[in-house]
Image (cartoon, grey):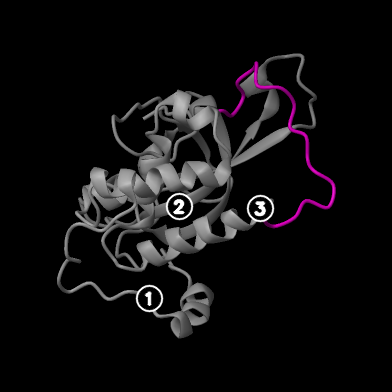
Amino acid sequence: MNGAQDLGGKMGFGPVDPEVDEPVFHAEWEKRALGVSLCSGALGLWNIGESRHARESLHPADYYSPSYYEIWIKALEKLLIRHGCVTLEELETGKVQTAAADGLKPLQAEAVPAAIAGGGPCDRAIDAEAQFAVGDHVLVRNINPAGHTRIPTYAKGKTGVIEEVAGAFVFPDDNAHGRGENPQWLYRVVIEGRKLWGADTDDSLTVSIDAWESYLEPA
């Protein structure tokens, strides 16, 4: 879906203004927001694709107005309710009213460093050979799935060149919706800036995107 997060190339949002010596967290509560989100994800009830989709499917009014970690918390609330971990009334009152679900194994404090260091690798081995090779010219398909997708809107319908065959990775469009990992080959595709933003664009500007094989077709 082309959600509120898909801002690449869109006007009206002002310039990107990097903060000098930006801190990792701007407030103490942000540390807790990140920690709660990661520990909730460690329960194993959802994957990173579903987590991203929960954030990206927020209504634009709920996505554009809050800060970064407020978006994380809004999405976490959706996930916790969806998977039966909490009820809306519990969130509103801050009081537990139902027993915890059986079989859940909370992430213990002593296990956090190893869990974070291990991450969540998404590379997979597949039998199929890569359809494209470095140097191939490809077209980014203009497809608009209703669910989660990693295709940036600004790249749809544009041609580019394969710069790297990155390997095979979990296909997020399926995995986010419980349809399995269905790994595909992933490519780095370089697109000329003028193809994205017109003839007045700096000739030296290029944009690289990561694209799963089903996003592409020969140019």
Whichever of callouts 1 and 2 sits on the residue coming sooner in the sequence is: 1
Residue type at mark 2 is Leu
Q: Residue at x 39, y 33 (%)?
A: 58
Q: Is residue 9 left or right of residue 100?
A: right
Q: Is residue 151 left or right of residue 197?
A: left
The x and y percentages for residue 37 are 43, 58
The CA span between labels 1 and 2 is 31 Å
Depth check, mark 3 against mark 2: the one in front is 3
Magenta stretch, main secondary structure, is loop
Element assignment for label 3: loop
Span highlighted in magenta in the image: 6-25
The quarter of the image holding the N terminus is top left
The x and y percentages for residue 115 are 46, 76
| Residue 107 occupies quadrant | bottom left
Residue under numbered circle 1? 107
Element assignment for label 1: loop
Residue under numbered circle 2? 186
Q: Quick one: 5 or 108, which is closer to the camera?
A: 108
Residue type at mark 3 is Ala
Residue 6 seen: no
Whichever of callouts 3 and 1 sits on the residue coming sooner in the sequence is: 3
| Residue 28 occupies quadrant | bottom right
In the image, is residue 211 above or below residue 17? Answer: below
Q: Is residue 12 magenta?
A: yes
Residues at circles 3 and 1 in contact by the CB criterion of under 8 Å: no
Element assignment for label 2: strand
The CA span between labels 3 and 2 is 37 Å
